[in-house]
Amino acid sequence: MSGHNKWSTIKRKKGALDAKRSKIFSKIIKEITIAVKEGGSDPEGNPRLRMAIANAKGASMPKDNIERAINKGKDKDGTTFSEVTYEGYLPNGIAVLVECTTDNTQRTVSNVRAIFNKYGGNMGTTGSLSFLFERKGIFIIPKKSGMSMDEFELEMIDAGAEDIEIEENTITVTTSMEDFGKMQKKLEELEIEVENAELQRIPNDTVNLEPEAARKILRIVDLFEDDDDVQKVFHNLEITDDLMDEE
């Protein structure tokens, strides 16, 4: 099984090159907090929390920060976050979904709408673009020396892998949303370190733009991602090799 998931690749590159470490930590802390409030503070019985902690470790978050985030989630009088998704079109018909975690939805929707309006986009109604994207589980795994790739691929296929992309230093495994938990459990059983695991919205089809127009779209995406309430941004812009090199 092979392929080239350009979406996960560019997201990984951006994450690896992003100097705003505190912003990355802030997003992970929110995810840990929500996971604890939803399913308790014991990672053994809370798959979402286990995944959030694994992602925190993959981002080199200090152990003290992780523990503080867990305690924050246990605080019944602490901040309550809501998870909301906004969607719409950017210039040239590029569809975008903006996933947010916020303690003030009025502030968040105002900020997101302002970016759509300022840069020639149109914010749509919730669910209006869901048909353009499919939720997939994306697992980024560091490639270790001595790994038997044949055995690894067989284990991954058994756990529901739809695609396995092997690069020089990393392996990207893609699953259906339904098999996300099964894959997470399999990797834990095999004691395989995961750099990052998350459900992503993968576009069913992509739109190819001229380089300058594409760069403008990516700059708008960066503006969304810079908002403290925004966790993830997904779009259906075709990411060419040239754009990847620029990232």
Image: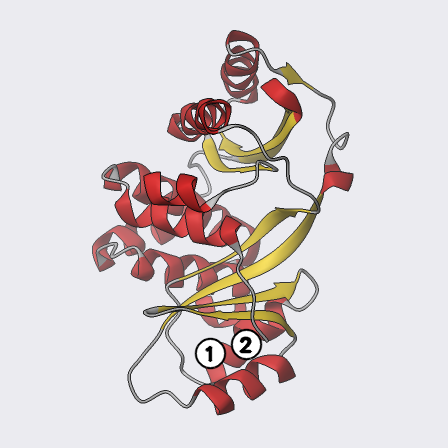
Looking at the rendered structure, the kind of residue marked 2 is Lys
**How many angstroms separate mark 1 from mark 2 (CA)?**
5 Å
Q: Nearer the viewer, residue 175 or 76?
A: 175
Q: Quadrant of residue 237?
A: top right
User: Which residue corresponds to mark 1?
Assistant: 188
Q: Nearer the viewer, residue 84 or 195?
A: 195
> Which quarter of the figure has residue 62?
bottom left
Residue 229 position in % (x across, y down): 45, 29
Circles 1 and 2: CB atoms closer than 8 Å: yes
* Mark number, residue 185: 2
Residue drawn at (42%, 37%) of the image: 78
User: In this orientation, does residue 92 appear?
Assistant: yes
Q: Is residue 22 left or right of residue 50?
A: left
**Vertical placement of residue 107 versus 95, above or below:** above
- Quadrant where the C terminus sits is top left
Residue type indicated by callout 1? Glu
Q: Position of residue 109 (x, y in %)?
A: 57, 18
